[in-house]
Amino acid sequence: MGNRKFQSETNIFEGGFWFLFLLGLNVASALALVFSTHELRQIHQSLDLAQRDETVELARHSRLLLEKSTLAGLNEVESIALSELGMEFPNNLEKASQ
């Protein structure tokens, strides 16, 4: 009978060890989940900021392309006026007499 009591105490300690071991693994898993979720949120926030910057830069690029095409059009008009129409910019500007 004494031998049986010793086996049950060993079984209790062994069961308690496994319970604590599995509980520790469960807590570690929960902490890993919390940290990975936090990291995912930070990555998503940086992605959101990058997409906002991309939108701003695309709008700026669009405005610059429009300005470039406007300036190219003015240069083309000036070159056509000089070469084909023989127009020149007046060097002597006098006030129109009244």
Image (spheres, grey):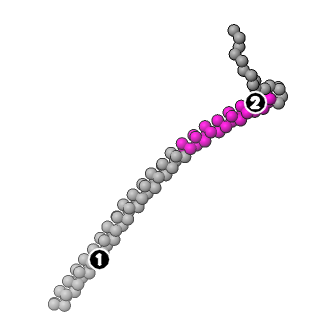
Instruction: Name above or below for residue 15 compared with residue 7.
Output: above
Q: Decide which of 59, 32 is in the foreground and name it.
A: 59
Is 74 contained in the magenta span?
yes
Q: Decide which of 69, 20 is in the foreground and name it.
A: 69
> Which quarter of the image is occupied by the C terminus?
top right
Judging from the image, what secondary structure is the residue with disc 1 in?
A: helix
> Which quarter of the image is occupied by the N terminus?
bottom left
Amino acid carrying mark 1 in the image: Trp
Name the disc covering residue 18, or none: 1
Instruction: Name above or below for residue 16 compared with residue 65.
Output: below
Residue displayed at 68% across by 33% down: 70
Residue displayed at 58% across by 43% down: 58
Amino acid carrying mark 2 in the image: Glu
Which residue is farthest left?
Answer: 2
Residue displayed at 25% across by 77% down: 16
Q: Residue 24 lies in what quarter of the image?
A: bottom left
